[in-house]
Amino acid sequence: MADVLGAFEQAVLLAVVRLREDAYGRAILKEVQKRLERDVAAGAVHATLERLENKGLLASRLGSGTPVRAGRPRRYYRLQPAGIRALNDARAAVDTLWQGLKWPLIKTRAMV
Amino acid sequence: MTTNPTVQAAPPRWAEWLLRLTLKRTDRESVSGDLLEEYRDTVVPARGKAAADAWYLRQVAGFVWRATWLWAVLFSGAFVIRQAVDFFIPTHDFIVRSQVTTYTAIALMAATSFWSAWRSGSVVSGVVVTIAMTLIAAVLSVAGVTLLLAIWHDPATLKAAADSGGIEEAYVMPFILIVPALIVGTIAATIGSVGRRLLIQREHV
């Protein structure tokens, strides 16, 4: 079975999927902030990217720098087959949990 | 020719230096570049230089916290447990207790420094991260001891605290430990950094 992903790990991996060839640190940070609709620390995203890469769910390569970055290179991330499996498993797990329930939930007497 | 002022804007140099010390050697350029790009492209134009500097410092603090929190929690945990043992199980012979806490503190300082120097390949990184860890642990320790005394402040506990070195010691000692952290940190960081270099050399042979 693939790795069990946390919600934040899923947000980071899905940002990499959405950004395709443009998935580098800052772009991933902004995408995660946009999707989660909250301020996210750069360190949190960086630590998650490092962990996902160590788990083999992501791979990275260095790109070129730009003047605004003082010439420092960007590190681009790419989803690995294990990452695709992990995301599919995470989605399947949520779908299974919700099976037979209508969404959004409406408060009923039985829940009170 | 005009130059874009935001491209010239720079965060505090010391903060950038501290950031780079908390990062792995391979991530140093790319991560500091990401933060600089966000700082210049988004934060300075939207909030101004002073607020952007504050944003940058918060980001760096997050990196420092992530590099140190686990060690700091272990370190302060050991300190607070020692205080609790002294408060609740009074003794006149502190030799064994002192030895246990001293060796635990040295081991945690050395581990922090070695790990950081190994990860970054830099002796300075090991030393700075260890000092940062000790400072954070000192704050956590003071909070822990305060909580202990807030809950248990009966005459017997206060007498045991006074007999074990006094309450002042519990508040001052965590900060004094920065001095041994500097010494232990330097030794362990040197071993970590040199060890990593030797390993890399061996792999390349």
Image (spheres, coloured by chain):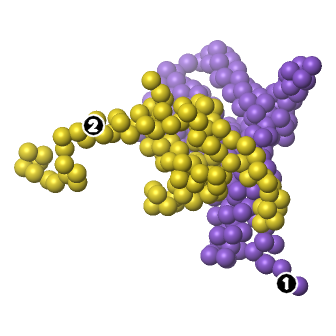
Look at the image and tell me in which quarter the N terminus of chain B lies.
Answer: bottom right
To which quarter of the image does residue B178 belong?
A: top right
How far across and down, in percent of the image, does residue B40 sit? 72, 69
Task: Locate residue B20, reporting x and y percent.
Answer: 78, 48
Helix, strand or loop under label 2: helix
Residue at image x 65%, y 38%?
A59
Q: Amino acid at mark 2?
A: Leu
Asked if the residue at tag 2 contacts the one at tag 1, i.e. Cβ–Cβ closer than 8 Å, the answer is no
Label 1 Cα crowd, 10 Å radius (few <14 / some 14-19 / many 20+): few
Chain of the residue where label 2 is placed in the rendered structure: A
Residue at image x 86%, y 21%? B203
Q: Which chain is yellow?
A: A
Chain with purple colouring: B
Q: Residues within 10 Å of mark 2 (few under 14, many from 20)?
A: few
Q: Determine which residue is flagged by label 2.
A: A97
Residue occupied by mark 1: B2
